Image: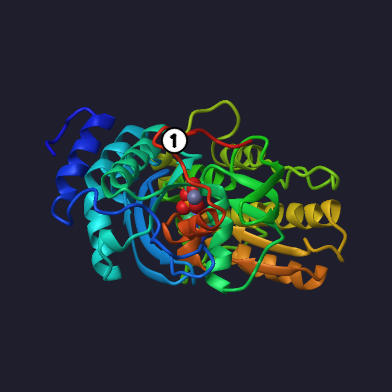
Amino acid sequence: MRDHDPLTRCDLTHYCHLQLKRHFAVGAGNGAKPGKTAQSFMVTILTIETSCDETAAAVVNDSLEVLGSVVASQENLHKKFGGVVPEIASRAHLENFLPVIDETLERSHVSLAEIDAIAVVNTPGLAGSLLVGLTGAKALALALDKPLIAINHLQAHIYACQIAFKTDVFPCVGLIISGGHSSLYRCDGPIDFTLLGGTIDDAAGEAFDKVAAMLGLPYPGGPSIQKAANNADYPGNPNAYAFPRSLLDDPDRIAFSFSGLKTAVRYHLVGPGKSIDPASVAAQLSKQEIADIAASFQEAAVDCLVAKTVQAMKCAFDTQSAHNTLCVGGGVAANARFRTKMEAAAKTQGFRLFIAPPHLCTDNAVMGAIAIERFKAGLFETLDLDIKPGLVR
Ligand code: KG4
Ligand code: ZN
């Protein structure tokens, strides 16, 4: 595809058709393999994830085996802007889409003809990014004559626990902590979610990203803050600064708030009403101060996440209920301090805890194995399937 072409659905569909000819005779299949029931046969699904700034694909089967997985990160493209630039993200997805699919199939030792369904994230996320994945997935489904399955990105983050621990984690309470979401769900089944509550302002990951930017630390902010807090030469003191922990004095309210915490760090750095120049702020701070601020911020954010989740577990369910299980997914769940403190809280409170392993916390297509559940339930989409961008609040 030529550089700087306008990003249109037609372009990508046409391009996919051309590329597909390399793989097989178009139109040979007719969806699910004949003569097999959903229970008895091995289903193999190609899952596609392009909701934000990772172009990812995976091939998974109904034994939840991952045959192959590829994640093409756009980190380097967005780094200099200190956050994801939606237009850059969608253009990069367009460039990465087919190479990522090719590489995934190669690693999986599976041909497109052997795939039973194409699954793709269509909600929530950035509009342009979702559109590239969905359009590519539709083109594949149409050309291959395979069923199309919709993936909810938030449900997939929780399903990462089912895949990683290979045990039935449902029913459970699901905590999703990512760049756009900090949400608690009652999960009666893998695709049966009811929102209990979420952030009333910033998401946890957003706060990590913005505080990192204020401190002149690179994007993505979560890993940078964690690294700065754990600096081997200048270990950060998590109690150096008493940053606020919002909403914890209201145990009946299932909600998070990180905006006040973010603002408290900003006021600590430059005071109220002043604009912030990260480069000059960072230049004025010693390595020890940066480590202490990073550690104190991280501690406050983690305390909010853990304490509020414990409150929600108590508030929503008695300890004998089937929902006495917590599953956690999303990029922030990769945070080592969060994992330690959440594990300690689960032990004290007596609930079962599954936190997705770090490589399945940040965006990936393996968690798209949730599509197997939709396949088994016969939940297929027509080519009218559209994106549902934005955040779920
Ligand atoms: O789930 P994810 O990969 O993408 C979204 O769905 O948003 O989450 C990305 C977020 C970013 O805000 C990133 O800074 C944060 O997860 N993150 C972390 C860590 N690794 C990624 N936050 C804290 N500690 C980490 N180790
Ligand atoms: Zn995510």
- Image quadrant in which you'd find residue 317: bottom right
Residue 322 lies left or right of residue 187; in this view the side is right
Question: Which quadrant: the C terminus?
Answer: top right
Q: Secondary structure at mark 1?
A: loop
Quadrant in which residue 85 is drawn: top left
Q: Residue 41 versus residue 189: which sits nearer the camera?
A: 41
Number of numbered discs: 1
Closest to the observer: 62 or 295? 62
374 horizontally vs 15: left or right: right
Q: Could you tell me residue 325's position as x and y percent?
A: 73, 65
Is the image coloured rainbow, by chain, by secondary structure, or in one colour? rainbow
**Could you classify mark 1 by the number of other residues whose Cα lies within 10 Å: few (under 14), some (14-19), or many (20 or more)?**
some
Where is residue 148 drawn, in percent x and y?
41, 46
Q: Is residue 232 above or below residue 311?
A: below
In the picture shown, does residue 388 fall above or below 98?
above
Residue on which disc 1 sits? 385
Q: Residue at x 57, y 73 (%)?
A: 165
Q: Is residue 281 left or right of residue 172?
A: left
Q: Residue at x 54, y 67 (%)?
A: 39
The disc labelled 1 sits on which kind of residue? Leu
Residue 19 position in % (x across, y down): 16, 48
Q: Is residue 87 visible to the viewer in this orientation of the structure?
A: yes
In the image shown, does 254 or 150 lie closer to the viewer? 150
Q: Position of residue 341 (x, y in %)?
A: 68, 66
305 left or right of 154 in image:
right
| Residue at the spot 27% in from the left edge and 59% down from the top edge | 112
Residue 243 visible within the image = no
